[in-house]
Amino acid sequence: MPHELPKGLSPETLAIVMGRDHSPGAPSNQPPVLASSFREGGDSLYTRLGNPTWSAFEDALGALEGGRCLAFASGMAAGVAVLDGLPLGAKVVAPTASYLGVRDVLREMEDEGRLRVRLIDVSDTGATLAAVADADMLWLESPTNPMLDIADIERLSAGAREAGATVVVDNTFATPLLQRPLDLGANIVLHSVSKFISGHSDLVMGALVTRDDAIYERFELHRKHRGAIPGPFEVYLALRGLRTLSVRLEKGQASARVLAERLEEHSSVQRAIYPGLPSHPDHELCTKQMEGPGAMVSFEMADAAAADTACARTRLIGTMTSLGGIETTMERRTRWAGEENTPQGLVRMSVGCENVEDLWRDLHQALG
Ligand SMILES: *Cc1c(COP(=O)(O)O)cnc(C)c1O
């Protein structure tokens, strides 16, 4: 008889128990299966088509998001799989402030005449609903990068559904422990597994999750034919990281709150942006929609020079891009081309698992 887990397990437990072989004698962890091909007669044939290491990871992340998961080579590979499936000339509504790579691809596809793209402030529910009325896809990110605006996923998904548009939510910043977009009415969840899910800044990987079998099959075919597959070793590491997601996220989130409150009071900081602060314009929506405001904090300094000086002065906090690792990092966002809508002095910080007083001392001396 197959092993049966108790019903109604909480997400933090699912992250630990899912994706394991519970049969007698099985290793307690799914090992990385480093093989391109498999002997005939079993479920696996060739690793571009599927690999047992993927299945273990996909079972775990799928259970957390409440759908069926497919692992991809990167978050961007997952995003391109979504956009490639749209018919020629389809209209996509997407956030003005969002992950740069996604906006770049949208612009490329628009320039090539493949898609029509409308960028909008997705925290403005009325304007977004109006834009989506004749759209084929609504692409959401919430909280958004790097301004940490919150989109009302439930209301926007209901409006999009009425208009016949597919809703994609990039859930990278929130993770399924803080927000479950499929429960709120979205059709597809995207993850850059490179960030909080894996959590150690040691790999690049992506994932898609959906409850719709037709969408799942289309993405699976895309992965098989376009070859955007993750290496089994990366997937092994990602699953190892996912096991500790709840402790990492809880710690980062608790410290993020403390740092955001102190940044808000600091004389060199013009504005601290954190959805957990009552001063955040979407604070109420965040409280309703999310289990917690997350571990990302942004703050605005007077200008680019002030922000650069602060970043250069940190000794504990690393100045680098990317996010979601156990180590705290920060960067001035407008050093990247394409972030022209972001304030010049905006610093985005990903809060990790170091001692919060060590982090504050470093920040405090860096801010001067
Ligand atoms: C990093 C990131 C991506 C892209 O993922 P990669 O794994 O780097 O390809 C997409 N969305 C968000 C919100 C991200 O932070």
Image: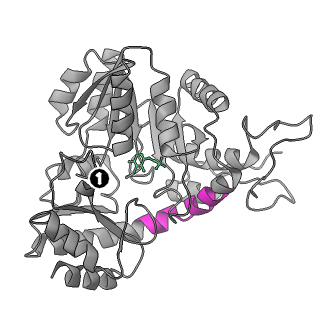
Left or right placement of residue 278 versus residue 191 in this view: left
Q: Quadrant of residue 180?
A: top left
Q: Main secondary structure of the magenta part?
A: helix
Left or right placement of residue 55 versus residue 210 in this view: right
Indicate whether residue 72 is drawn in magenta. Answer: no
| Mark 1 vs ligand 1: CB below 8 Å | no
Q: Where is residue 19 in the image (x, y as percent from the top left)?
A: 67, 51
Looking at the image, can residue 185 be seen? Answer: no
Q: Where is residue 271 in the image (x, y as percent from the top left)?
A: 11, 63
Q: Which of 211 and 332 is in front in this view?
A: 332
Left or right placement of residue 170 versus residue 9 in this view: left
Left or right placement of residue 214 versus residue 314 in this view: right
Q: Position of residue 210 (x, y in %)?
A: 52, 33
Residue at x-position 23% and y-position 60%: 276
Where does the magenta region start and end? 236-249
Residue at x-position 76% and y-position 53%: 21
Instruction: Bin the neighbour count of mark 1 within 10 Å (Cα to Cα): few under 14, some 14-19, many 20 and up.
Output: few
Pointer 1 residue = 336
Residue flagged by tag 1: what amino acid is it? Trp
Q: Which of 183 and 189 is in front in this view?
A: 189
Residue at x-position 92% and y-position 40%: 39
Q: Quadrant of residue 95?
A: top left
Q: Looking at the figure, which quarter contains the N terminus?
A: top right
In the structure shown, which secondary structural element does the residue marked by tag 1 occupy?
loop
